[in-house]
Amino acid sequence: MEASNQESGPDSQVLRTKDTPSEGFQFVPETGVGRPQGPLRDIIRSRAKRKKAKPKSKYKAGSNRIVPVIRRTSDWGELELRSASSISSADDVRDFTSSPSPSPGLGSAALDPFSTLPIEEDGSSYFLLSQFHAIFNPDTHPYSCTLTKDEVIAFAITDSALLHAALSHSARTLCDTPRTESITERDYHMGQAISLVNKRIAQSPDEAVSFATILTVGWLTQFEVLSFSVESIKIHLDGLEALVNSRGGIQTLVDNPLTMKFILWIDTVGSIALNTKPRFEVAAIPSRENPADWDPLNHLALRYKTKLSNLTRLPDLSKETIDVYWGLRNITAIKQANANLEKAPKLGWKEIFSHISRFVNRLLGIVHYDLPPSRNQNDQIYALFGNAALSHIVMFLRGKPLRHSFSVLLSERIRAGLEMADLPSFQMQYPEMMLWILIIGGLGAVKTQSQWWFAQLVAESCLATGIARTSEISFFLEEFFWTDQYIHPTFTEFWDDVAIALEVDNSEGTVVDELESNKL
């Protein structure tokens, strides 16, 4: 429309009144479909290039601000309410001025645009979540529970304390890498998890806590297990037991299998560390054992079952010991066959680790069996076997053969038991079992002061049974319990010591003479 043909009237006058330069707008007459030329084009371009000034934020860090409340519902019916005003309140546990710095990498983000996390974004939460797969991987972490990344994260993002605990584990895993800021992130997220849990318990001391809170305390307990602080492990397990009892006992966790599975596992690991019975009964979980998976007992196993029962007068305990021993022998062979891809696996990895978890609990029951008051020296064989079998699981069934604090701890307990036992008598009654126990103790004692002590006993036991070289040991133990993992390069020093001790003892002949005299 041309300017000369514009209507005049009240409406036109109103438009002219509103569209004045004082309002900050510059209107130009229409020019049809052609592009504006000259001064008009310059005005339009100048307006288009001009950036709108950003208003300064009226809020400071730590001030209250009103935002929508976020509702999150977990798969187990729990509801959590969160608002940024409560997060940023002065009495909240977060201190944004000391938050970890953002970490570059896949999955990192500086903000959470869709509010998918129940915690404030500190710049590295997504990166830590992307690393979470390595935390509970049994092939690389011998102490880990067999939890999958998806089920853990799906639950963790429903609860702020639980997510902080999960991220602290991710950061701890990364502490072994050159990524030095992980130490700060580990401490930050652990501190947040502890503070949130303490607040919940303080605010509702007489109420049953949520599954997420129980699992958070379980994950915090795992930190103490990894650092091997015996006193702290006990304190955390005491608190964990109280929280579980507040819900009515371990059986009430059946509605949340993830929490129940982890709590039973951390209770087991803590029991090994403290050398005590587990606090919770594993019978709360339906048994999945299938004897059809195992080969039938061989003649040696049957002979040991009868011999243990006759010598100790404990038929039930002897049966349990042989049952666990035979299952452990079978599961070791199955796991090794799966690793070597020799044939179609009898069991998947989940079934394998389910069996292993049950074996650990049954072995703890054997080690801490309530023996009758009129016990005799022969009863000590059960604790020796139980600790050796636990050490075998820790070193060879949870991942690659590696040395760590638990294998050393169990080796020390085996040595303490051997020093109190009638060793020559045990070697005559249970030659295969005793040699196996000595070898497991020695493998766990690699690079410790007990390494040579065990090597000497292994050499003495070998000579007493007619074994002159280390290469013959595998043939002697093949029918009882042997795996080629025992000769992994990690344990070369121990086997070198055994070879040296064999040469020394073979030349002296004192050990054989002593054992022969005991037989007479």
Image (tube, helix red, strand yellow):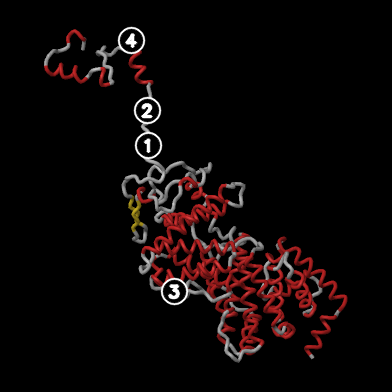
For mark 4, what is the residue? 39
Q: Which mark is residue 57?
A: 1
Which residue has dot 3 on it? 284
Measured Cα–Cα span from mark 2 to mark 3: 64 Å
Instruction: Find residue 48 and report its image quarter.
Output: top left
- Tell me which amino acid carries mark 1: Ser
Residue drawn at point x = 38 percent, y = 33 percent = 56
In this picture, residue 376 sits left or right of residue 452: left
- Of mark 4 and mark 1, the one earlier in the sequence is 4
What's the amino acid at mark 4? Answer: Pro
Q: Earlier in the sequence, mark 3 or mark 1?
A: 1
Read off the residue under disc 2.
53
Q: Quadrant of the C terminus?
A: bottom right
Give the side of residue 429 with respect to residue 251, left or right.
right
Looking at this view, is 297 or 193 the one in front? 193
Three-letter code, disc 2: Ala
